[in-house]
Amino acid sequence: MAGEADKEKGAGEKPKAEKQTNCPSCNKLIKKLKRYYRNGKLYCSKKCWRAFVVKSKEEAGKENK
Ligand SMILES: [Zn+2]
């Protein structure tokens, strides 16, 4: 009986939220105070955002070729 109750408790656990916590450019943990938000994504700094934009542009260019 007690075991059943425990199972229900576990089922009520919240699923892991897909929150972006790492910088897509350098993969470092983004700190709340220094985060940089652009185009729906969070970066740890403006520098990383620029680096990511350049990188994604290069990759897109390769695919077009
Ligand atoms: Zn970064």
Image: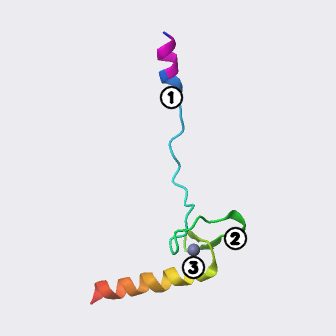
Q: Which residue is mark 1?
A: 10
Q: In the rendering, which numbered label is found on residue 34?
A: 2
Q: Secondary structure at mark 1?
A: helix
Q: Earlier in the sequence, mark 3 or mark 1?
A: 1
Note whether 47 is above or below 3 in the view shown. Answer: below
Residue 49 position in % (x across, y down): 56, 79
Residue most extreme to the left: 65
Which residue is drawn at the image coordinates 60% and 83% (left, top)? 47
Query: Which numbered disc covers residue 48?
Result: 3
x and y percent of residue 56 in the render? 43, 81
Q: Is residue 49 located in the magenta-colored stretch of the structure? A: no
Quarter of the image that includes the C terminus: bottom left
Q: Is residue 52 above or below residue 40?
A: below
Q: Residue, x 63% and y 80% (percent of image)? A: 46
Q: Circle 3 sits in a helix, a strand or a loop, which is it?
A: helix
Q: Earlier in the sequence, mark 1 or mark 2?
A: 1
Q: CA distance from mark 3 to mark 1?
A: 39 Å
Question: How far is disc 1 from disc 2 in space, using C-alphas?
Answer: 35 Å
Tag 1: residue type? Gly
Mark 2 / mark 3, whichever is N-terminal: 2
Ligand 1 closer than 8 Å to label 1 CB: no
What residue range appears in magenta?
Answer: 2-6
Q: Position of residue 27 (x, y in %)?
A: 52, 69
Residue 3 point in image, percent of width and height: 48, 15
The picture quadrant where one finds residue 33 is: bottom right
Q: Mark 3 vs ligand 1: CB under 8 Å?
A: yes
The number of discs equals: 3
Q: Residues within 10 Å of mark 2 (few under 14, many from 20)?
A: few
Of the residues shown, which amino acid type is indicated by label 3? Answer: Cys
- Where is ligand 1, by quadrant? bottom right
